[in-house]
Image: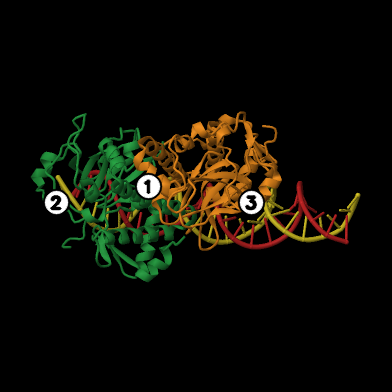
Chain colours: A green, B orange, C red, D yellow
Amino acid sequence: MDDPAAPSLGSLSGLRADEFARTSDWSRPVSSPCERCKLRALIICDKLLSSNAPGPNSDREEWQVHGLGRAQRNLKSAGDRANRVHVICEGWAFSFVQLPDGRKQILSILIPGDVVGSLAPFAETLSFSVQALTDIRYCGYSASSLKTRLTSQPELLEAWARLLLAERQGVLGLVVDLGARSADERVAHLMLDLKTRLEKRGLADGNSFSFPLSQRLIAAATALTPEHVSRVISRFRSARIIDTAKGALSILNTTALQRIGSLNF
Amino acid sequence: MDDPAAPSLGSLSGLRADEFARTSDWSRPVSSPCERCKLRALIICDKLLSSNAPGPNSDREEWQVHGLGRAQRNLKSAGDRANRVHVICEGWAFSFVQLPDGRKQILSILIPGDVVGSLAPFAETLSFSVQALTDIRYCGYSASSLKTRLTSQPELLEAWARLLLAERQGVLGLVVDLGARSADERVAHLMLDLKTRLEKRGLADGNSFSFPLSQRLIAAATALTPEHVSRVISRFRSARIIDTAKGALSILNTTALQRIGSLNF
DNA sequence: CGTCGTTTTGAGTTTCGTCAAACCCTGTGG
DNA sequence: CCACAGGGTTTGACGAAACTCAAAACGACG
């Protein structure tokens, strides 16, 4: 990994910046890079793309579309019609709910390979929003086609259910975090969780990896204030447990961080 | 409803106390009361019991079993093999995770009609535990049979997915509660949530209903301490917003309670 | 070089937790 | 019938964790 910083526009693989400019409307399809995708085997895409992929369905709706999204822009908003299941191919995003007073509560940080809106085939509308954190590349599958395929392909149903299981595991972890953990523990856990998830996807090898979360977002994810997050991170830094620089996080003392943030329940 | 208190052993419908005594082992089947069940139409049971219910499968495993559980006893424990999906027929229960230091974090309060372990068909083991809060009657469906039926009966898959949607909605609500709400708001919301859920099941009509939660459990559900819950409830009581007596909750001032605890996001 | 968002730091406050004791019920056994 | 034990609840004093408000420092970027 040459640059640990957040993926910039230019780094989105297979697409030059000018191509991005032309296709930045996220509903517009771009040429499919799935053949070269290293994540395919790790997640549900393999099952989705296997064999009998359907053509456009009755509504002339494409089974699979590719798109790009700019940092800070919403991919989905709560209340939107839930007609596609999306997979993050490159870049980071996060799902959240917006409270009436303007606060956001982040539900999950999405990294490449993560699926968002897995229940879309059966939902009327979205109950949360999704925002790109960096520029992202994603692909979307037709929710209605997926729904019909779920009944005809048992192994797809199985893979889809495993997805739901992992999702639920994640949100249960969040509940425990918010309900039973201190600020230090929550922040440490967030970092460790992201590290292991990135490793599973082959996106982090050493103890230093891309980490494009601002402290404001860490705060929204851990239900703390940005000021307090700053204090926690400063403390971690001066204890030589972690270091941060330019969108990257370095874990200097894994054991110490795990002692603080490993929640086994 | 003659007695707003928690259902006692004797009140479990269709079963006398001595019958309960003989069948208190929750794995032992008892005669099926599903025909008379008023909840059937409201939840997934209708789909599960419709038409082609399978007989015992290859493992000689019953498709549907009925059981009774005593208050305070675990119906399921984290780590157990996930081989049945259960429906609460009578009584209350709750799902929770046990933290290493002994604290419990309650994930959801289960009332009659609630389904627990809906993902069991695809899970190896349980990731949380379920405990009876009052004596309960429940029924359990074979996870493996359900799994095969999901692929063959699209309308069952649909009903099952709707269940998952509701479950996720619930846990997202919990995340927002724990992440963004004050103690007053959490307690008020818990009470309102239970009231509306009971009403939907036809188990509460007026503003006074059975509420067998101890303050220790309310604390575990809201991630507060019992002492603090006591203070909150005392304040509500002296503001004439609610009243509690003998396992029943009376909402004296719905508007006030909603002003405190209605979280719309 | 100035602007804007992010991070840092500080002082003061609030909310909630901790610890400990008292209280209230209900059930039990003498 | 009463004493007593044991759980749940209430109350109080105190402390700690995290929030609020405000200002300064630090970048990134035009």
Q: Nearer the viewer, residue A133 or A160?
A: A160
Residue underneath mark 3: B24
Drawn side of residue A227 relative to residue A32, left or right: right
Calculate the distance from the C-alpha at mark 1 to the C-alpha at mark 2.
31 Å
What's the chain of the residue with tag 2?
A
Calculate the distance from the C-alpha at mark 1 to the C-alpha at mark 3.
41 Å
* Rendered image: mark on residue A35: 2
Q: Which callout, 1 or 2, points to the residue nearer the camera? A: 2
**In the rendering, at what x and y percent does residue B103 appear?**
55, 58
Q: Nearer the viewer, residue A84 or C18?
A: A84
**In the rendering, at what x and y percent does residue B232 appear?**
60, 44
In the picture shown, does residue A59 fall above or below A142? above
Q: Are marks 1 and 3 on the same chain?
A: no
Q: Are marks 1 and 2 on the same chain?
A: yes
How many labels, in total?
3
Callout 3 crowding tier (Cα within 10 Å): few <14, some 14–19, many ≥20: some
Callout 1 crowding tier (Cα within 10 Å): few <14, some 14–19, many ≥20: many
Judged from the image, the secondary structure of the residue bearing numbered disc 2 is: helix
What's the chain of the residue with tag 1?
A
Q: Amino acid at mark 1?
A: Leu
Q: Is residue A224 visible?
A: no
Q: Are marks 3 and 2 in contact (CB under 8 Å)?
A: no
Q: Where is the C terminus of chain B found, in terms of image quarters?
A: top left
Q: Is residue A130 visible?
A: yes
Callout 2 crowding tier (Cα within 10 Å): few <14, some 14–19, many ≥20: few
Q: Which callout, 3 or 2, points to the residue nearer the camera? A: 3
Residue underneath mark 1: A107
User: At x 70% / y 32%, what residue is drawn?
Assistant: B2
Q: Amino acid at mark 3?
A: Ser
Judged from the image, the secondary structure of the residue bearing numbered disc 3 is: loop
